[in-house]
Image: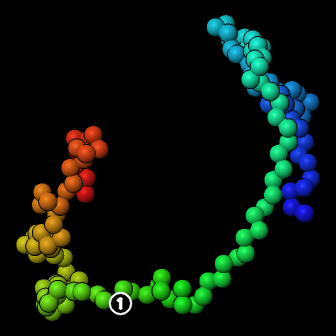
Amino acid sequence: EWGESPLPTVSSSTFLLGAEIVHEDLKMGSDGESDQASGTSSDEVQSPVRVRMRNNPARKISTEDINKRLSLPADIRLPEGYLEKLTLNSPLFDKPLSRRLRRVSLSEIGFGKLETYVKLDKLGEGTYAT
């Protein structure tokens, strides 16, 4: 069965790397030399833990579930005349926007309007974020 083999026991303060023993509980003195830390009663060696995998059956994802996530909302409410306005006012993309059209476009999305920005006083900051 999964996870039935015991794990090797390793001391919490010593690891063997190659032929070298590395101690975790070392304290460095002011002269740069390491002093062995004194062990306390809280430095207990824990016994190995057995890990078992969960037996969750794989959830079947139906085509209907996928289509629900990928589809657009059933009711898209565009303002009256929005598409007509969009096609009439949108300039051709082969030439750059004029300064006036750029300002109108930015104004439509709320750029530069105070109500567009959220003051972060609630979070303790004194700045604005969009």
Q: Is residue 129 left or right of residue 73?
A: left
Neighbor class of circle 1 (other Cα within 10 Å; few <14, some 14-19, many 20+) is few
Q: Eyeballing the image, is 20 above or below 90?
A: above
Identify the image quadrant of residue 90. bottom left
- Number of marks drawn: 1
Q: Quadrant of the N terminus?
A: bottom right
Identify the residue at horizontal 78%, vertical 61% (top origin).
53
Identify the image quadrant of residue 36. top right
Identify the residue at horizontal 10%, vertical 73% (top origin).
104
- Depth check: give the residue in front, 103 or 111: 111
Q: Eyeballing the image, is 3 above or below 41?
A: below
Residue 11, x across and y down, in percent: 84, 31
Report the residue marked by disc 1.
74
Identify the image quadrant of residue 114. bottom left
Q: Is residue 17 visible?
A: no
- Depth check: give the residue in front, 25 or 83: 25
Q: Eyeballing the image, is 70 above or below 6?
A: below
Q: Eyeballing the image, is 85 above or below 21?
A: below
Residue 117, x across and y down, in percent: 19, 56
Residue 111, x across and y down, in percent: 16, 63
Identify the residue at horizontal 22%, vertical 41% (top origin).
126
The three-letter code of the residue at mark 1 reads Ala
Q: Is residue 67 left or right of residue 87?
A: right
Q: Is residue 25 left or right of residue 128?
A: right
Say what secondary structure mark 1 lies in: loop
**Rendered image coloring scheme:** rainbow
